[in-house]
Image: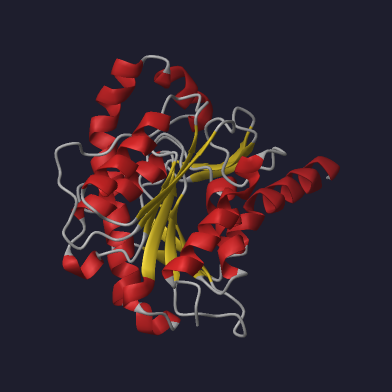
Amino acid sequence: MKIFAFRLLCTVLLLAPVALAQDVIPLYPGVAPGSAQENYPEKAYFSKAWNTDVVTNVTRPTLMVFKPAPELKINTAVVICPGGGFMALSIASEGTDVAKYLTARGVTAFVLKYRLAHTGEDGAAEFGTLYADKPKFDAMMKDEEPKAVADGLAAVAYVRQHAAEYGISPDRVGIIGFSAGGFITAEVALHYKPEGRPAFVAPIYGGAMSQDVPVPADAPPMFVAAATDDSLGLAPASIALWQKWTAAHKSVELHMYAKGGHGFGMHAQGIPTDHWIDRFADWLQMQGFLNK
């Protein structure tokens, strides 16, 4: 009985970040476009490999809604895309913790659980093994990345379409993403349709984006943050994004930290990367997105 109670408590604690969301919305009415009907379940657990809460095996994308207190509420919203190599989602540090920070500043936040590759017991641990064989990883991602990007595009369009229901402005809906989620964010910034144009984009230590796609004429302002010592070697991709936006004469701000590694998210390390999100809030304020 004690063992059962302990396991129940562990389950409750692991799901606590998800439970804080006021609502969970399916992104599509049925099976996601381009996907087959799958019979394996989504999984939420604490990954020892990453030392954080993760979600794996997402086949039905959803938006977890985090609403600010009424007295704080402004009409800005943001879609948040956690990272995880398209094999898992770092759902707390790069998802719900970011949402809580932004809702405290009046922003309505939507944490996106986008489609992921099918993994086994621990998708986070599997990512480390697969990424060591980069050609094999890249080959696998050719099937996964387009679906995840489609979910990112659909998420921004959905929030814009339903803006009135959440008391937000459709012209003040942005997107922020981390690592794989940063890649999604960069792709959304390049491939949106008019009804899904993000008001602002923030790829945080994201991967490479479409090199041959021009910056849209009405491209949104961009905020970029990464660390020089990124263990996956993705710092140059962040610089390339800054250069791409700069060359197109579009508004962009880059924060390249000396230390922080890959995946610093909302983790406290006692170094300047701890405050990247404060700089993001400063940038949102400067852009007018934190005004009532």
Q: Is residue 36 visible?
A: no
Residue 27, placed above or below residue 143: below
Q: As displayed, is residue 87 above or below residue 71?
A: above
- Quick check: 181 above or below 134? below
Q: Is residue 152 left or right of residue 263?
A: left
Q: In the depicted view, which residue is nearer to us: 65 or 249?
A: 249
Residue 192: give x, y in percent of width and height: 21, 58
Q: Does residue 273 appear in the picture of this structure?
A: yes
Q: Is residue 2 left or right of residue 27?
A: right
Q: Is residue 60 above or below residue 119?
A: below
Q: Position of residue 18 (x, y in %)?
A: 58, 58
Total number of numbered labels? 0
Q: Residue furthest top?
A: 133
Residue in the picture at 27% in, 38% down: 209
**Residue 106, image quadrant:** bottom right
Colour convention: secondary structure
Q: Position of residue 69 (x, y in %)?
A: 62, 79
Residue at the far right in the pictured view: 2
Give the residue at x 28% y 47%.
246
Q: Nearer the viewer, residue 284 or 163?
A: 284
Placement of the N terminus among the 4 image quadrants: top right
Q: Residue at x 25, y 43 (%)?
A: 244
Query: Residue 235: where, in percent of width, then height?
Result: 42, 31
